[in-house]
Image: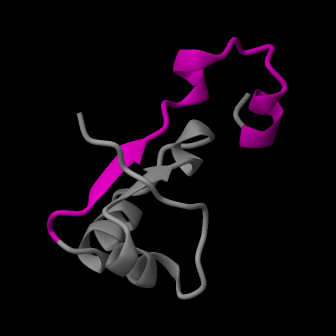
Amino acid sequence: MEIYVGCCGTPGGLKNYSREFKVTEINSTFYRIPKIETVQRWRETVPEDFIFTVKCHQAITHPITSPTWKKSGIK
């Protein structure tokens, strides 16, 4: 079993972060699905062996009555 360690946010952004760590969780996907251009930019910014984990969208994990839905702007 492998355990990956990372952190939330770094000065210099994803490019600098990926020099020190091999994985990151994409938290923003909980609120909205990113544009394809955004995902492509993330991929182009990091080494080929870098791992992205994606947080499930709240439509999968939370009822529509959850307060987190208000943050998303989805009706």
| Residue 41 location (% of width, % of height) | 34, 73
Q: How is the image coloured?
A: one colour
- Please tell me which residue lies in front, 6 or 62: 6
- Please tell me which residue lies in front, 35 or 66: 66
Q: Give the residue at the far bottom of this rendering.
A: 12
Can I make out residue 11 in this image? yes
Along the horizontal axis of the image, is 12 left or right of 63?
Answer: left
Q: Is residue 30 above or below residue 12?
A: above
Along the horizontal axis of the image, is 58 left or right of 69?
Answer: left
| Residue 47 shown in magenta | no
Measuring 43% from the left and 84% from the top, which residue is drawn there?
16
- Please tell me which residue lies in front, 4 or 42: 4
| Residue 63 location (% of width, % of height) | 69, 11
Q: Quadrant of the N terminus?
A: top left
Q: Which residues are magenta?
A: 48-72
- Please tell me which residue lies in front, 49 or 31: 49
Q: Quadrant of the C terminus?
A: top right
Can I make out residue 73 in this image? no
Q: Is residue 44 above or below residue 33?
A: below
Along the horizontal axis of the image, is 41 left or right of 72?
Answer: left
